[in-house]
Image (cartoon, rainbow, N blue to C red):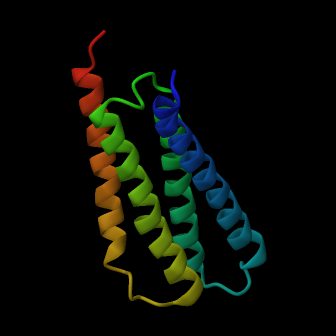
């Protein structure tokens, strides 16, 4: 495989690993370091954000190891959507929980929509994949 073909694989492997790292770090930080300073509602936001970020980080790792990761448009859409969802959905919930600022509250559902688009694109890849 050439370097150009390896680039998307490295990108999605790195994106998945970074999202997994952040998900674990934020979940642990909130559960242990912030449990006395955040409201139960804010802790739940961090828990939700961390959970969604971890699942979609794992999905990115799965895409990275698929043979068609560098060529298939459905997989590229899925991966970019999962990454966008992690940034918008989890990022806005982390910001809300840690700062109380609701300025990005409208971004959260867009992140959820990005997750749905990613799963639909992955399903499309599965349905249209050739042997």
In the picture shown, does residue 54 fall above or below 2?
below
Query: In terms of image quadrants, where is residue 108?
Result: bottom left
Residue sitting at x 49%, y 82%: 96
Residue 47 % position (x, y): 58, 65
Q: Is residue 62 left or right of residue 17?
A: left
Residue sitting at x 27%, y 49%: 117
Quarter holding the C terminus is top left
Q: Residue furthest top?
A: 131
Q: Nearer the viewer, residue 31 or 96?
A: 96
Q: Is residue 43 left or right of residue 69?
A: right
Q: Residue furthest right?
A: 32
Query: In terms of image quadrants, where is residue 29?
Result: bottom right
Residue sitting at x 24%, y 32%: 124
Q: Nearer the viewer, residue 32 or 82?
A: 82
In the picture shown, does residue 74 fall above or below 55?
above
Residue 97 % position (x, y): 55, 81
């Amino acid at each position: 495989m050439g370097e150009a073909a390896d680039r998307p694989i490295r990108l999605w492997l790195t994106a998945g690993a970074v999202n997994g790292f952040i998900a674990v770090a934020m979940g642990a930080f909130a559960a242990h370091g912030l449990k006395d300073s955040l409201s139960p509602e804010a802790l739940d936001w961090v828990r939700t954000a961390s959970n969604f970020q971890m699942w979609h980080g794992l999905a990115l790792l799965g895409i990275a190891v698929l043979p068609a990761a560098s060529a298939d448009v459905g997989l590229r859409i899925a991966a970019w959507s999962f990454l966008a969802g992690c940034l918008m959905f989890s990022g806005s919930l982390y910001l809300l929980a840690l700062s109380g600022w609701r300025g990005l509250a409208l971004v959260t559902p867009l992140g959820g929509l990005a997750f749905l688009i990613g799963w639909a694109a992955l399903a499309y890849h599965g349905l249209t994949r050739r042997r």
